[in-house]
Image (spheres, rainbow, N blue to C red):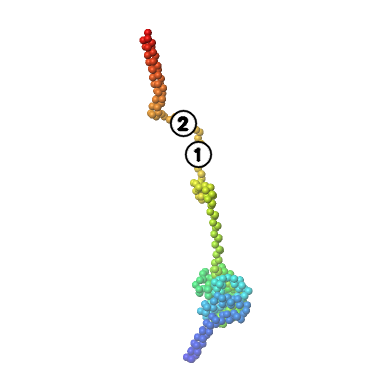
Amino acid sequence: MGLKASHYLLSLTLLLVFSTVVTASNITRAFAKYSNFSTMSDLFIKTKLTIPISKYRTITVLAVSNDAISSITNRSDIELKNILMTHVILDYYDELKLNGLKEKSIMLTTLYQTTGLGEEMNGFINLTKSKGRIYFGSEVKGSPLNAEYVKTLYHNPYNLSIIQISMPIVAPGLSLAIFPPPPPPAPLAPAPSPMDAAMSPAPGPADEDNASDTAVPKPKPATETPEVDSPAPTPSADNLKIEAADKAGPSSSACKAGLSFDFVLLLAFFASFAAF
């Protein structure tokens, strides 16, 4: 009994070790049997996905043929790696297991979900069986289930399985954002020549008003009123004195002139009288 138990444990240990080696090292060897899937095999090597795959003993690869996978081969290396990781299911499915599924939908965890970058369920795959046909698609809400199961290419029960689907699955959010190039800088305005600077008018209040974003209403001109003769100003005391002096000046001079003439005539009279 003890010998049988030891033999069973040894066989189980060897099986686990062998399974790990098959999953990590021989995934490309499994693809090598099918030349129509060489592009996907090359992409697994290019993106170095065999390294994270080696951490798992149970893997199912959703394989896409060369002509179908051409729709994503022009993407960047990071985008390709993210997309391919969603085609690596961390569970085992082959033709026998798929045919035994009931008509329902189940959620499958992918290698991309283990990176911690998954958002809004884009690290999960939806498997739906309907009317005997099996479809795969992203678990993101609203994503189409348009990748149909075709056949099983390779299977090593409960360790590695490669099944063909009709088209690649690109979950929303896996592609890198492509930003438009920044607009070219605006050309600098040429500096004005000294003559132009001298001839240009200096900015005044009107320019400042025009620079405002909101239009300021201009005040209406005041209504013109008819001219009215203004009353004469009231004369002050000084003005009265000046006017009195102007009026008195000629009279005094006339009086003095008259007196002098009379005195001359009186002297002439006395002189003529004395002569007699």
Mark 1 lies on residue: 222
Amino acid type of the residue that numbered disc 1 sits on in the rendered structure: Ala
- Whether residue 219 appears in this view of the structure is yes
Q: Answer above or below: position of 206 versus 86.
A: above
Residue nearest the observer in this picture, 90 or 196: 196
Q: Quadrant of residue 70?
A: bottom right
Mark 2 lies on residue: 230
Amino acid type of the residue that numbered disc 2 sits on in the rendered structure: Ser
Where does residue 166 sit, x and y in percent of width and height? 61, 74
Q: Answer above or below: position of 21 versus 122.
A: below
Query: Looking at this rendering, what residue extends furthest in the front direction?
Result: 275
The Cα–Cα distance between marks 1 and 2, rounded to whole angstroms, is 20 Å
Where does residue 186 sit, x and y in percent of width and height? 55, 58
Q: Quadrant of residue 132?
A: bottom right
Location of the C terminus by quadrant is top left
Q: Nearer the viewer, mark 1 or mark 2?
A: 2
Badge 1 local density, few (<14 within 10 Å), some, or many (20+)?
Answer: few
Residue at position x 44%, y 29% from top? 232
- Whether residue 214 appears in this view of the structure is no
User: Along the horizontal axis of the image, is 67 left or right of 269?
Assistant: right
SS assignment at label 1: loop
Residue nearest the observer in this picture, 159 or 241: 241
Q: Earlier in the sequence, mark 1 or mark 2?
A: 1
SS assignment at label 2: loop
Where does residue 95 sit, x and y in percent of width and height? 59, 79
Q: Which mark is residue 48?
A: none
Residue at position x 53%, y 73% from top? 112
Query: Looking at this rendering, what residue extends furthest in the top direction?
Result: 276
Where does residue 55 sit, x and y in percent of width and height? 51, 79
